[in-house]
Every structure is written in structure tokens, then in C-alpha cells.
Image: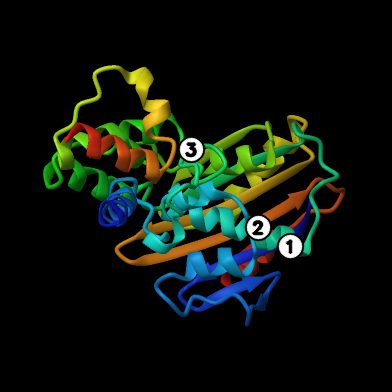
Amino acid sequence: MKILASCKISDQGIYLNGEVQQKYTKETDNWKKDVYSKMKLDYPKFYKMDALAKMAFLGFELMESVSSFEHFEDNDVALLFANRNSSYDTDLRFIESYTEKGSPGPSLFVYTLPNILTGELAIRKKWFGENIFFIQENFDPEFFIDQINFYFRKGSKACLCGWVDSANDKEECFLFVVEKTDGEITAEELKKYYKQ
Amino acid sequence: MSELKETLKAQIIEQLNLEDLTVADIADDAPLFGEGLGLDSIDALEFIVLLEQNYGIKIADPSEGKEIFQSVDSLAAYIEKNQ
């Protein structure tokens, strides 16, 4: 197992493969749109996504700007994601749509499940491998390694993994892509990537 | 008409939760679905709600939607005609 790329987005900034980014920052409230514009991406569906999906989308695009995953076949890549607060922010906005604005908003409703973000990534990349989204208290490196090994035993050749969380104005996104190789990575090593 | 179009753009952003977009980002004649704003059938429901809540217009025949929701131009024209 080998980590091909990683991206961390937190209050401390945006890190790509462990390097803090000067071009892409979190300095404004509109940082997601800023990063999207600076990357010159052309994917209008981005504007419809909720905060979780936007972060995962941008995190992946950032990784892909420095690493290529094109050599993987469509069914080779599994998606393994988790977070603490599910779709809490969007859930609140959806409740507000029918308690204060008169009618439940369908465009919000579709994001009231966190695993929608895995669908957004799969659609974007046309990856059709296994995908799953867990709700956990904290990022658990040992759990991720166990799950990745499970997918590798089942035939996946790579795994896009992520801890993407958003609640109460606190956003966090940690993505990494691992490739199946002979070597192993330890929970401690993975924890270091997460803490970067 | 131009005031209505600007109001419509703001309402589209609000109703469809496109908070990273501004009124200036939406051209009057840009396709709202597909390539333009990338909207889909879920968003068509939002347009139906928008028309009913803000302009008191009910679309009796859903098949009309494709033409009405083509762009801000077509939406504004439909509202002017039916209000």
C-alpha cells in the first residue's frame, strides 16, 4: 500500500502532499469559489454542491493537479469516506427551508446524506468501484487501513479516502489516494499525513 | 424587464442555494440547465416553487417547463405574460 497523493484543508490552510499552498488559501469566506476559479475548473455542477461535496471536489481536483490517477480503470478505484457530523449543516438548512421559507427545498434535500459527495466524485471521475461513507467520532487511521486492505483483497487497485466534515462553521477535509502495492503503511504514518 | 431579470437571478441563487454565484455570474441568455448552470430535474422543481411563491404562477402543464426554464430571458418573459 502506497500513498500517491494527499490533500488537507482545515482552518490552518490548504496542504497538498504536505506542502502548504500559497496560491490556494482559505483566507476569504468564499474560499471554495476562489480555489475553483483559480484552478480554472469548468464544472457548473460545483455551484450546486453543499459544503461537504465542494470540499471533497476541490480536494480531489487539487490532488489531481499534481498527481495522475488516469492509469486506473473505472472499476479499480474504491471510495472510502467518513466524518463525524454526517450532513449536519445541510440538514439544518433543509429544516430551515420548510420551517422558515415555506417549502422543503429539493436541491437541499439531495444533500441531506453525506455519501452524496462520493457520488459527486464518482460522477466526476466516472469511477464505478465500491464506495462507502462511515460516521465516526474522529478520523481513525487503523480503521481506514483495515478498510483499504479489505477493498484491496476484493480486487480494488486503488482507494480514494477521505475524512470530510463540516459543522458549526468548522470545516475539515483530508483526502488521500492509496495504491495497492507490496508495502504497507502504518496507522502512525497515516496519522502524520492527517496531522500535516 | 431588466429589473425583473436581476430579481430573478437573485431568487434563483437563493432558491437553488447557489451561494457561491453572484447575479453577475448569470447571463440573461445562458442556458440554466445542462451546460449553463448545470441544473437538473431536481432544480426544475425549485423553479416551480419559485414561480408559485414569488409570482403566484402555477405551471399547469409540466411539459411547458423545458421552454420556460431555458434561460433567465425566457423565465422573465413567461412571468411578464402570466402575472
Q: Quadrant of residue B76?
A: top left
Where residue A191 sits: x, y (%)? 61, 65
Kindly check if marks 1 and 2 are in contact, taking CB atoms under 8 A apart as contact.
yes
Mark 3, other Cα within 10 Å: few <14 / some 14–19 / many ≥20: some
Where's the C terminus of chain A, which quadrant?
Answer: bottom right
| Residue where numbered disc 1 is placed | A65
Q: Which subunit holds the residue at mark 3?
A: B
For this orientation, the residue located farthest to the bottom is A22
- For the point 37% across and 67% down, which residue is it? A170
Characterize the local packing of mark 1: few (<14), some (14-19) or many (20 or more) Cα atoms within 10 angstroms: few
- Mark drawn on residue A61: 2
> Do tags 1 and 2 sit on the same chain?
yes
Mark 2: amino acid: Glu
Q: Which mark is residue B33?
A: 3
Which sits in the foreground, A27 or A149?
Answer: A27
Between B8 and A134, which is closer to the camera in this rendering? B8
Marks 1/2: CA–CA distance: 6 Å
